[in-house]
Amino acid sequence: MSESHFHVHGPHDHEVEHQAHAGDAFAGRIAVTTAILATLGALMSYMGGATQNDALLWKNEAAIKKTEASDQWNFYQAKSNKQNLAELGMTLSTGDAQERYRAEAKRYSDEKKDIQKKAEALEKEAQDANARSEASMHTHHRWAQAMTLMQVAIALAAITLLTRKSWMQWGVYACAAGGIAVAGFALAHV
């Protein structure tokens, strides 16, 4: 407006201007609470995804080690078959041939011991990887539970804002506190 004119505000204009400067304290608190809950929820969602990926990687590692152990047991079985044939040859022959088969049978027996140790070690690695996968999956479930509580808290905050019932804020805070507690369990791997 120019300096030569003046403007008179109506009652409605005054209230709109007052709300723009002062704001609605209740709505402001709910908005800030919702923003904080959404941020915490995003962090929980990220951690849930990360632990789920870890669980899948460990499960894959377990499958690889189990396959390697199976290969070793197959190798062990092949050596057993060769040992049995050498022992049969030793029984059916005499002289130099019998001594050659005896040496082969001993060699296969010795080789089997090393193969058995390797197969058992690989089976142990597979079991360890499976255990780590299960632990990661448990932690993932904790993060998912925490995120669910945060989502409920955000939904309650929206209902609180729409209904303008201040007592509902306690439900928002209770769900958020529950989500934070469960997130603490996830961090502690409980």
Image: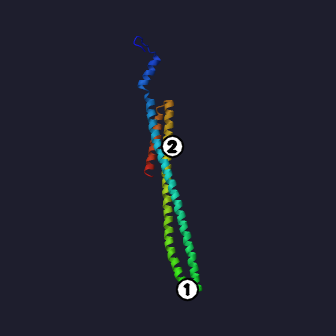
Q: Position of residue 2 (x, y in %)?
A: 41, 13
Res. 38 visible in picture: yes
Ranked by sequence position, the earlier of labels 1 and 2 is: 1
Which of the two marks, 1 or 2, is nearer to us in this view?
A: 1
Q: Position of residue 152 (x, y in %)?
A: 51, 40
In the foreground, 129 or 155: 129
Relative to 90, 168 lies left or right: left
Residue 98: give its label: 1
In the foreground, 147 or 114: 114
What's under tag 1, amino acid-wise?
A: Gln
In the foreground, 126 or 141: 126
Res. 178 visible in picture: no
Q: Position of residue 66 (x, y in %)?
A: 53, 63
Query: Circle 2 is placed at which residue position?
Result: 148
Q: Residue furthest top?
A: 4
How would you rate the neighbour count of disc 1 (Cα within 10 Å): few for under 14, some for 14-19, many for 20 or more? some
Name the colouring of the figure: rainbow
How would you rate the neighbour count of disc 2 (Cα within 10 Å): few for under 14, some for 14-19, many for 20 or more? some
- Residue for point 55% across, 78% down: 83
Q: Residue furthest left?
A: 3
